[in-house]
Amino acid sequence: MDFYLTALLQGLCFSGIALGIYISMKIFNIPDITTDGSYALGGIVTGVTLTHAYPLYISIVVVLLAGGLAGAITGLIHTKLKINALLAGILVMTALYSVNLTIAGRSNLPLIGTASIFNVLNFTADVNVNTFIILLVIVAVLTGFIGYLLKTDFGIAMRATGNSETMIRALGVNTDRMKIIGLALANALTALSGFLITQQQGFADISMGVGIVIIGLGSVIIGETLIGWLRITSVWGSLLLVLAGTIVFQLVLAVTLAVGVNPNLLKVVTAVLVLLIVSLPRLSFRSHD
């Protein structure tokens, strides 16, 4: 049971990534690979600040600013230098590996005896359950903030930028600025996931972001599939189902490991799982033809 609870906790920790990819890929239609680097950046910054005994509130602010800056740089490269968004993300992601290594000073940072957001409040003596409650509160706050933002005039302009850039530009909206802010927000959320998972697992690693975009993408695709099946049109419903997709994705991986699949093959299993998630709706559609 603890095995699946751990998967649930990881799913909640990855909620920031799912929301970030939802913003970049589903709202702006930008395939942002910066995610791999900004996730590791969030983890490394968390490790460095906490091992240097900075307060948690300082750590989380620095993490959000660092992730936001990484996303903004990708946005600037894409909009101002007219570089393909995918290539811009790859360039920033590649650069962030060296940045992260420079910040950390080594490849791995253990968080032994450091402060943790998961023991700031003690609702119960059970560590996992206490972590679960705190993560639920964090995810609820995040979802509330993003849901509220997307329903404001600014959020509507963001959504319109992805849906019909030419039209919204004709109405006087600076679409380049929207993209930069959107990517900054998406990567700040991704870095926040790095902040959470680093404390949940007890260490930060320079390679922790490798392939993380696949997990986020798989979670969003599951959420999008659920949105299509249930015919959800509201912003709040869409966000909740994307978050549900994150948890479902992690639980499926947990079941895969539980049935005896070699942990060394987990990345392969993850890739195949995402491929299946992407392919099944198309195969179903073709079968109706």
Image (tube, rainbow, N blue to C red):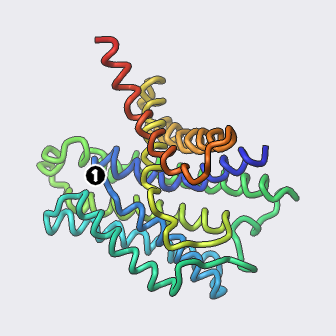
Mark 1: which secondary structure? Answer: loop
Q: Quadrant of residue 59?
A: bottom right
Q: Which percent across, then down, holds residue 104?
A: 52, 83
- Seen in the picture, residue 272 relative to 137 is either above or below; the reply is above
Q: Alpha-carbon neighbours of circle 1 within 10 Å: few (<14), some, or many (≥20)?
A: many
- Seen in the picture, residue 259 relative to 78 is either above or below; the reply is above
Q: Residue furthest top?
A: 288
Q: Is residue 250 left or right of residue 160?
A: right
Q: Quadrant of residue 218?
A: top left
Q: Which percent across, then down, holds residue 97?
A: 40, 74
The reply to whether residue 140 is visible in this rendering is no
Foreground pick, 255 / 193: 255
Q: Quadrant of the N terminus?
A: top right
Q: Amino acid at mark 1?
A: Ile
Q: Quadrant of the C terminus?
A: top left
Residue at left 49%, top 43%?
219
Q: Residue furthest right?
A: 125
Foreground pick, 122 / 103: 103
Residue corresponding to mark 1: 30
Residue at left 39%, top 79%?
98
- Seen in the picture, residue 3 relative to 35 is either above or below; the reply is above
